[in-house]
Amino acid sequence: MAFEKYAEELGRRKALALAMGGEKRLAKQRALGRLNARERIDYLVDPGSFLELGMFAVSDRPEAREETPADGKITGYGRIAGREAAIISHDITVKSASSSPINVRKMGHMRRAAIANGIPFVLLNESSGARIPDTMGAVGTGILGQDPHQFVRMREIPYVSAVLGPAFGTACWFTQLSDFVVMRKDAYLAIASPKVTEVAINQKIDPQELAGWRMQSEVTGKVDYAVDTDEEALDLLKKFLSYLPSNHGELPPQAAVPAGSDQTVQEILNIVPENRAKVYDVRKVVAAISDKDSVFALKDRFARTAYTALARINGQVVGFLASNPMFKGGALDSDSCDKATTFLVLCDSFNIPIIILADTPGFLIGVEGERRKAPGKIMNFMTALQMCTVPKFSIVLRKSYGQAYLNMGGTRNSDEMLAWHCAEVGFMDPTVAVNVVYGVRAETEPERFQKLVEDLQRESSAYDLASIFSAQAVIDPRESRAWLSRLLEVHKRRLSRGIGKHLMAGWPTTF
Amino acid sequence: MASETVKSEITGKVWKIVLQPGARVAEEDTIMILESMKMEIPVMASVAGTLTQILVKETEDVAEGQAVAIIEY
């Protein structure tokens, strides 16, 4: 056969590349209960759809050429639920998946192709960081930074990351830039490893405090979901992508509407107590309004006073932002503002209409909040809300006070504002206002205090809000789904075929 | 055995202690209810485990960030 020698050589080299870092290191991954870099891709993508680029890339150091198949990062195109994606899977068995000029070149190639062709950028992150000793010295460090746009994010396409092991350096950087992050509970996410950090600062470091899943889920909010296995992580990446378009020039995919989806909203009066002193879990309200089983929360362990979730109504993807009275009585704090802002930017960047549910006594005030830059964060939230060009609908459920009323879509901060029949809107808690404005205290002048509270509470009802046309309608809670459904039908932004202006495409990914 | 300190997220008054030391808790189970901003606001378990200590009494004032219970898991 002609070219037989060449065919054999190609086969031989392919087999070497597919063997990754060798059986011993692969066995170690298996023993840790982890999939390897290639198994992760196989699990994620539609069978047979992975087209690998850079299989024969190797380290640019001659002495390392034989020991760096694919130079430690597997890259290529794969179809995820039928849609093309650009995939990077770091191979921890090859020099701990450390970054080098060649494999960073591969990553840059994938990133540029993804953006140019409007397909999601999917990163399966596990890496020790920059390769040492390659990056040492002026030549080693100076050769970095070849790509002047490496870290620019203009949200043309979704970036999604799974943190599947220790993720430092580039693996950490791209996780920070991502729209969705899932992390294994035995993984680490930080600038540098606990070991490097310990040596550098000469102090014992608790890896969980430095880089653990709870810290990243609850304190920084960078992680949306924490899981036990690679398969669960990859399933969640797929799930997130199913709510988003492949790029910002497309609409999110439409889905079928499960039977019974119109009935769940009838339960809403059993979820929300009439007694204002009692709190409830707004997550149940969002589920009642949405298509059955369509709700997908983001950052649920972070800033729980604000609830952010993707969902569907009549098969159309929407983004819910709701204050949750179960946490802090629904009073919004600095972290809630950050969480809301991030979510608004995500929805607006990918043509997802926003639905805001307000039941809040206002923003938390105090010294701690001020030290955490609460006013600036309230303004970030407000700026993001006002820069949205996707449709925004808001509903006042029970109460909405002060600036928070505005941040939660009040008056012209949403395209249409509705109020439940029991809603109450005002500037501040009347009992505080009486004290501040009249200097009267409940303890010393109870009758006069009570009368002044009643005076200030006048004109606070849903009907008062509607009387000045700040609310476009007053509705029974059970009508919420029907109203939102119809408003979504009307607010299709037909002149631009549903595609927004994406004014926040370049918003920072962390702030 | 690890130990988790449950902290109050708000300033308020302890209205009702719902669970006693020894109780097994799941994440988000209500341990006690605080009164603040005219609402009854739950303090919830942040991990699943066993509630070993309640650090406050009913009618006591608590500050934001104050430790109110210990869970071992």
Image (cartoon, grey):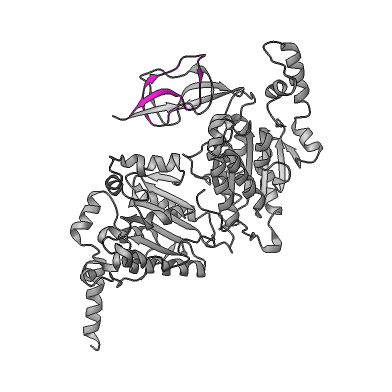
Q: Is residue A483 visible?
A: yes
Q: Position of residue A462 (x, y in %)?
A: 74, 33
- A25 vs A41, left or right, is left
* One can see residue A477 in this view: no
Furthest residue to the front?
A138
Q: Residue at x 37, y 64 (%)?
A: A47
Q: Quadrant of residue A40?
A: bottom left
Q: Give coordinates of residue A333: x percent, y percent.
A: 56, 36
Q: Is residue A300 magenta?
A: no
**Front residue (pair A140, A80):** A140
Of residues A100 and A282, the one drawn nearer to the viewer in this rendering: A100
Locate residue A20 relative to residue A150 in the image: left or right.
left
Label total for image: 0
Which residue is depicted at the point 65% across and 43% down?
A: A481
Q: Nearer the viewer, residue A260 or A202?
A: A202
Q: Quadrant of residue B49?
A: top left
Q: Residue furthest left?
A: A24
- In the picture provided, is A309 more to the left or to the right than A501? left
A352, above or below A67, in the image: above
Quarter holding the N terminus of chain A is: bottom left
Q: Position of residue A488 (x, y in %)?
A: 67, 51
Residue at point 40%, 40% (across, down): A215
Range drawn in magenta? B44-73
Q: Residue A109 location, x and y as percent?
A: 42, 70
B51 is higher (above) or lower (below) than A106: above
Q: Residue furthest bottom?
A: A2
Q: Residue at x 70, y 46 (%)?
A: A413
